Image (tube, grey):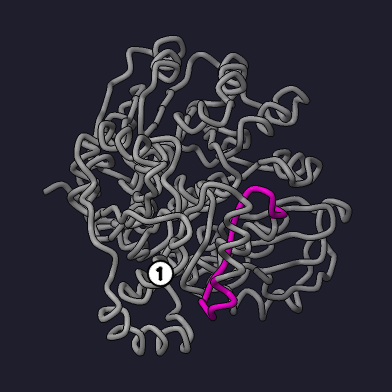
Amino acid sequence: MIHFEDFHLSDEVLKALSGLGFKVPTEIQAKVIPLALQKKDIVGKSPTGSGKTAAFAIPICESISWEENKPQALILAPTRELAAQVSEDFITIGRFKRIKAAAIYGKQSFERQKLELKQKTHVVVGTPGRVLDHLKKGTLVVDQLSYLVIDEADEMLNMGFIDQVEEIIEALPTDRITLLFSATLPEDIENLSVNYMKSPTYIEVNRSHSLTGKTNHALVEVQEEDKLSLLKGITIVENPESCIIFCRTQQEVDGLYQKLIKANYSCGKIHGSMVQEDRFAVMNDFKKGKFRYLVATDIAARGIDVEDISLVISYDVPQDKERYVHRIGRTGRAGKTGKAITLATTKEENLVREIEEYIGEEIPKVKPPSKAEIELAKSSFTEKMSRRPQPKRDKAAEVNKDILKLYFNGGKKKKLRVVDFVGTISNIPGVSADDIGNITLQENATFVDILNGKGQHVLTVMKHTTIKGKQLKVHIAKD
């Protein structure tokens, strides 16, 4: 059995992986990490939920030079949610190497992103449109770029981003390592690998094994007018701790969400027309376990990693066969078993057949729960709905437990530099430069990560210590 130690990773990366609870690499990680560390181009065909992000984040974090201020890795992601999540994953895995990652995407202040990119930034994760904007305006400097990762490449294609991706690639240094990951490899994605990669190694993690090995999937036939009552019956009998219900359109999400709220479901919703801050807030609350049911369009089917989703329900059969794989990939993650139930009307029979042909097996048909089963399960379901969900484990909490982020009310406008903070804090008795993590210097504020459980000590001392002759207010930073 392979362990992460077998890859000869640095103590800093291994410490972060240990804190995350990563013990044994997944199949995609075991295949990708050694090749990426050897600086090989890779095309990875891997189903969602297989541990793909860590497969590229671990070797990139290992290879990053902290001293270099300009971006060394660019990761392209199809959605804002995925860009934000991948950026957080890099920060967590690279925590003890003090790696800084920035997420850049649309519907967020360009100027704010521009300021962030002017500071030391090792990894940039972004959606194609916003990355292209920064490249054209010269605010994303790529002359030190060593890695390009194209994540969820088939979704880039589905969303019409492929031309933007090619334009981005044309602007990057040719002397780089390119890693491309996709659940499927349609012709246009194959062409990307042929045109822009150097003799890539092709790695495939078996899709059908992932479907049948970790996720029990089933199909229930239903008339359109009976869908809501069937959904309620299924959720009463299954009584999941955490569940995503996928709808095809934003209007269906809004309508179903209202009906479930009216029926006293612990529920949230997400779709593309929502304000970005609201989308992030809903996903964060769902990840923390603040509600049990998330009604969503396929925006939530791609790459979003939420702990312990035991049930996924497709309220509609997805029109793209690939989306079926991504929907059910939200459950049965990290080696756990999950269940995926699809509600199908007679009008959707052709879509079901396409999916079955694509995954290479029939989706087992099951009968809807009987009235007796629903009646028997109702009290347990009602009891669970009446109590607050158990908070979910924050996978980064263990890594971050000895880190305290401090806020100082001074930055560039007061002529302060990163070295001023490092010099002052490392002179505190019992504190060294190794105890100082990421420093984010803004116009009027500075945020400093203090590592190794020394945050409170630094906080106490800095309340009475000047930086470059200036006494700054200091307190624990808010989230």
- Residue linked to disc 1: 242
Residue 356 vs residue 95, the one in the foreground: 356
Res 335 seen here: yes
Quarter of the rendering containing residue 331: bottom left
**Residue at 74% in and 22% down:** 136
Q: Position of residue 420 (x, y in %)?
A: 73, 55
**Residue at 35% in and 53% down:** 342
Q: Residues within 10 Å of mark 1 (few under 14, many from 20)?
A: many
Judge from the rendering whether residue 402 lies leftward or rightward of residue 32; answer left or right: right
Residue 22 vs residue 333, the one in the foreground: 333
**Residue at 39% in and 36% down:** 322
**Residue at 20% in and 42% down:** 362
Residue 221 on the magenta segment: no
Q: Is residue 358 above or below residue 233?
A: above
Q: Position of residue 377 (x, y in %)?
A: 30, 83
Q: Position of residue 81 (x, y in %)?
A: 57, 49
Judge from the rendering whether residue 262 lies leftward or rightward of residue 119; answer left or right: left
Res 99 seen here: no
Judge from the rendering whether residue 283 lies leftward or rightward of residue 44; answer left or right: right
Residue 378 vs residue 125, the one in the foreground: 378
What is the quadrant of the C terminus in the image?
bottom right
Q: Is residue 223 above or below residue 163?
A: below
Quarter of the rendering containing residue 253: bottom right
Q: Is residue 89 above or below residue 390?
A: above
Q: What amino acid type should be assigned to the residue bearing mark 1?
A: Ser
Extreme residue in the right direction: 413
The residue range painted magenta reads 260-276
Q: Position of residue 38 (x, y in %)?
A: 30, 27
Residue 293 vs residue 106, the one in the foreground: 293
